[in-house]
Image: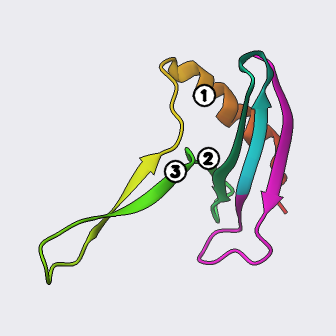
Amino acid sequence: MDLENIEIRKAKHPKGDDLQKGVAGLTIKDMGININNIPYRVTKEKEIIVSCPGLVYAERKEKGEKPENKLVPTISFEDASIWDSIVEVIKKEITIE
């Protein structure tokens, strides 16, 4: 798998207890796919966590009940090793300050 154009965009002022937050983007050249807005964060323990990009939808409830938020992934791979490779490449590109 040929991963190119790996871009890391750090949030200027991360909220919460994390040292760093941001999003990544890359191209899977042999598949002709550009993937953007892959969220990542760096914990206080300097652990890098990369998440699948997704959208949050509020699940409809009965009137008066609070809606429950659901994360819906915007991309997935039948072969999990593809995502594992993407995560490893992104982790290598992130510099912890």
Q: How far apart are marks 3 and 1 (CA)?
A: 17 Å
**Residue at point 13% right, 79% down?**
63
Tell me residue 44's x, y (percent).
64, 65
Question: In the picture, residue 89 is in which quadrant?
Answer: top right
Label 2 sits on residue: 50
Nearest the eye: 49 or 76: 76
Q: What stretch is highlighted in magenta?
A: 1-22
Label 3 sits on residue: 54
Cβ–Cβ below 8 Å for labels 3 and 1? no
Residue 13 falls within the magenta-colored stretch: yes
**Residue at point 69% right, 57% down?**
46
Identify residue type, mark 2: Val
Compare marks 3 and 1 and give the one earlier in the sequence: 3
Q: Identify the element where label 2 is drawn.
A: strand
Q: Distance between the residues labelled 1 and 2?
A: 10 Å
Q: Is residue 39 left or right of residue 63?
A: right
Q: Identify the element where label 1 is drawn.
A: helix
**Residue at point 39% right, 61% down?**
57
Identify residue type, mark 3: Gly
Q: In this view, does 88 lie to the left or right of 59?
A: right
Numbered tag placed on residue 84 in the rendering? 1
Q: Is residue 85 above or below residue 68?
A: above
Q: Distance between the residues labelled 2 and 3?
A: 12 Å
Compare marks 1 and 2 and give the one earlier in the sequence: 2
Q: In this view, does 37 lie above or below 97?
A: above
Q: Identify the element where label 3 is drawn.
A: strand
Question: In the picture, residue 93 is in which quadrant?
Answer: top right
